[in-house]
Amino acid sequence: MERRRRFGGTFVRELSRNRYLYLLALPGIAFLVVFAYMPMLGHLLAFQNYRLSDGIWGSEWVGFKNFAFFFNGKDWLRVTLNTVFLNALFLVSGLGSAVVLAIFLNEVRNKLFKRIAQSFIFLPYFISWLVVSMMALTLFGTSEGLINRVLAVVVGFEGVDWYLTPGAWPYILTVISAWKIAGYNSIIFLAVITGISAEYYESARIEGASRMQQMLYITLPLMRPIVMVLTLLGIGRIFYGDFGMIYAIIGDNGVLFPTTDVIDSYAYRALRQLGNFSMSSAVIVYQSCMGLVMILIFNGIARKVDADSRLF
């Protein structure tokens, strides 16, 4: 009882001392509660035979029946592997290209050129996935696609029916994802680089280090903590496919499902075509649990390798 009273007094004093800081945090906390925690009630549908007429609390509870339906099918392993594989490609290509862009931008000395380059690099991030899908169709269309036209003119190749070639699309989507997100991530890395003390580079120049050696032995090592944090955040979402990109570019093209169908698009298609809220919720709960497991595993690895780079 005494310990509880002491804790309550400490909490009240802390709240009183930093009341303005907590007041500033209140909108963010409210946003998280409304848009992140309250929707978690929807996970209850995964354990029910949900019917709109009965509502969440009136629907029949069926335990893990919806999960059994998902795992007894032949699609769960395919969509899981596709999700992990595609997100791994997106993560490596997105962060890798962003690091390279940030380093190159940092080496540019002409301020006007640097600002123009940053604007053009950052621009793809604001382009809608629907517009990107039209651009992809322009590039990879069978008869009118730019790539097939170039192949026909340069090497006399008749062209490829890209939208009927599943094996090519993981790599096409990787290039598109890196093109769209690299500029955004490069701004983060560029901010880290500008925060590095100039004394490191001055000392290196005095010792005769070239600019390449400065990048390899000063810039990259000091960028490692933020790279690790972004990697861990990406790994935490490795079971979350980029639904906007996949559905905008691939859509309902069943020929490409073997290599591009991810958990998000599978759950959405199950809901849209079958109208089964419970099964779709079971898929999303599975997705969330696997994402939590992955981030716990890799955070533990990061804690042992570099304690300063862990998330918690």
Image (cartoon, helix red, strand yellow):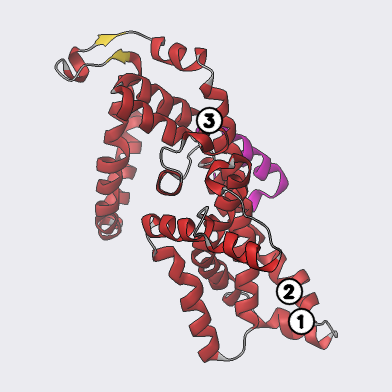
Q: CA distance from mark 1 to mark 3?
A: 45 Å
Amino acid type, residue under disc 3 in the picture: Val
- Residue 215 shows which numbered tag? 2
Structural crowding at the residue carrying mark 2, measured as other residues with C-alpha within 10 Å and reported as few (<14), some (14–19) or many (≥20): some
Residue that label 3 marks: 79
Residue that label 1 marks: 211
Amino acid type, residue under disc 2 in the picture: Met
62 versus 297 height, above or below: above
Asked if the magenta segment contains residue 305, the reply would be: yes
**Residue 232, x across and y down, in percent:** 58, 47
- The foreground one among 192 and 237 is 237
Can the viewer see residue 310 in this picture? no
Residue drawn at point x = 76 percent, y = 77 percent = 214
Left or right of 69 in this view: 211? right
Q: Quadrant of residue 47?
A: top left
Mark 3 residue element: helix
Residue drawn at point x = 24 percent, y = 41 percent = 34
Left or right of 88 in this view: 239? left
**Residue 207, x across and y down, in percent:** 85, 84
Q: Earlier in the sequence, mark 2 or mark 3?
A: 3
Structural crowding at the residue carrying mark 1, measured as other residues with C-alpha within 10 Å and reported as few (<14), some (14–19) or many (≥20): few
Magenta highlight range: 292-312
Question: Nearer the observer, disc 2 or disc 3?
Answer: 3
Q: Quadrant of the N terminus?
A: top left
Asked if disc 1 and disc 2 are in contact, CB closer than 8 Å, the reply is: yes
Mark 1 residue element: helix
